[in-house]
Amino acid sequence: MTSLAPQPLSPLDGRYRSAVGELGEHLSEAGLNRARVQVEVEWLIAQTDRRFFGSSPLSAEQQARLRSIVTEFGQADIDELAGLEATTRHDVKAVEYYVRRSLELLGLDDIAELTHFACTSEDINNLSYAITVRDAVREVWLPKIRDVIDALAALAVEHRDAAMLSRTHGQPATPTTMGKELAVFAHRLGRIAAQIEANEYLGKFSGATGTFSAHVVAAPDVAWPEVSREFVESLGLMWNPLTTQIESHDWQAELYAKVSHANRVLHNLATDIWTYISLGYFRQIPTAGATGSSTMPHKVNPIRFENAEANLELSSAVLDSLASTLVTSRMQRDLTDSSAQRNIGVGFGHSLLALDNIQRGLGEIDLDPDVLAADLDGNWEVLGEAIQTVIRAEVVAGRSTITDPYALLKGLTRGKRVGAADLAAFIEGLEIGDAAKRRLLALTPGGYTGIASELVDRLG
C-alpha cells in the first residue's frame, strides 16, 4: 500500500479547519511562540526603560523596530524557530536564541544579555499562555457564543406567542410558548458568558522557584516584586505574587470549568431542538444539493445539532481534564502541565465547532404552528391544573364547598384523553362562582400559557 503524505490527525485541522481556523491565530504552537517572543521583547524594553545594569532606554524608533518582530511574525519566523528548537531541544531556549539573533540584525546586540534575564522558562510560558488563551477567548470564542445567544434571542422574540405543549418528564404538561423556552437558554448562556468575560488571567514573573533568588543576587537594591507586578500588568494580565516555579493555573481551571458549563447548557439546547424537530415542531429547511440519508431520499437529518452534541462532549472532556490536571504540580515543579496545556486549543476547538453548528442549525429551522396547535388540541386534560386551582380559590373565597379539588380533577384527567366538550360539561356542573366558571369555559390549551410571552422581555 502506498503511504499517504502527512495528513492532519485531528479533524479540527482537517475537515473542520474552516470553522475553527481562527483559533489557530492564538492557540497553535505558532501562536504560542509569537506570544513567547512578545514577552521576551517586552521584558527587554522594560529593563532598558529602568536602565538596568547601565543600559539606556531604547528610543521610540528602536522600540517600534523591536516590537515589529512580534507584529510581523510569520512563516519564515516559525520555520526559523523550528530549526533552532531542533538543535536546542528546548522550545523556550529556541525563542531566546531567536530574539538574540533579531537583536543583532537590529543593531541592538549591546543589550543581548538582557534577553531572558533572570527568567525561568515558566516565566515566559505562563505569561504566553495567559495572553494566547485570553485573546482566543475574547476575540474568537466569546463573539461566537454571543452570536448563538443573539440568534436564540431573535427566535425567542419571533416565537414569543407560539403556544406549545410542555413535556415535563416527557409527558403532556402546562403549555408554554416556544419563544419563552428559547429565551430560557439565551438567558442561561448569557449569564455564563458574562462570567467567562470577567475571568481573571494571572501571570507570575519571579524566577526558578518563585523567590526572585537570581534577581536579588544580581541587583540587591531593586524592588523586584514591584518590577514583576508592573511587568505582568503591562501585558494586560493580573499579577500572581505567590507561586512556585509555575503560575498555579487556578485561573485556567476556573475558566475551563465555566466554558465546560456553557458546553453542557449548549448540549441541553441541542438535544431539545433535536427533540422539537423530531416532534415536528420545527421543520428543517433543506439545503440545495445536500443529502440527508444515503438510502432514504426524503430525509433531512438534524446533523447540525447532532454534530454539536458530539463536539461539546469532546470539548468538556478535554477541558475538564485540563482543569483537574493543571491545579496540581509536584513540589515546586513537574512537567505534566507542559504536555497538558498543548491541548488547550483542542478543547476550545471542539466547543467553537459546536457553536458554529448550532448557529447554522438555528438558521435552518422553521416553526410549524399547525403541528403545535394540533398537539395542544389533542391534550385538553392539561387544563386540569387550572381548573383545580380555580376551585381552590373559590373554596377559600366561600363560593364553593367542593372538597379536595385535586382528587376531583385527578379522577377526571389522570391517564385519560379528555376533549373540549368533556371539560366544558364538567365545568358547567361545578359549584363555583359565575365569573370563575366563565373564565374556565373560555380557556383553551393554547391560551393557557400564563405570562410566557411577557417573560421573553426579561432578556433585556
Image (tube, rainbow, N blue to C red):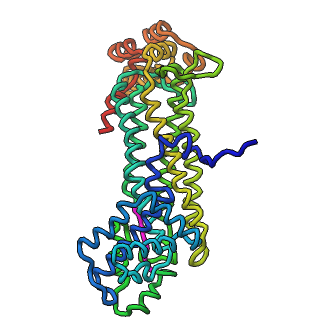
Foreground of the two, 396 or 337: 337
Extreme residue in the left direction: 60
Q: Where's the N terminus, which quadrant? A: top right
Q: Residue at x 47, y 81 (%)?
A: 207
Foreground of the two, 96 or 293: 96
Tally the numbered discs.
0
Res 295 → quadrant: top right
Task: Label the magenta part by its dominant secondary structure.
Answer: loop
Left or right of 38 on screen, residue 404: right
Residue 62 against residue 360 in the figure, above or below: below
Residue 281 at least partly seen: no
Res 313 → quadrant: top right
Write down the region rendered in magenta: 200-206
Foreground of the two, 85 or 389: 85
- What percent of the width, then of the height, locates residue 135? 39, 56
Extreme residue in the right direction: 1
Q: Residue at x 51, y 81 (%)?
A: 208
Does residue 204 show up magenta in the picture? yes
Foreground of the two, 38 or 144: 38
Residue 413 against residue 268 in the figure, above or below: above
Q: Residue at x 58, y 68 (%)?
A: 86
- What percent of the width, then of the height, locates residue 106? 34, 73
Does residue 336 show up magenta in the picture? no
- What percent of the width, then of the height, locates residue 200? 40, 62
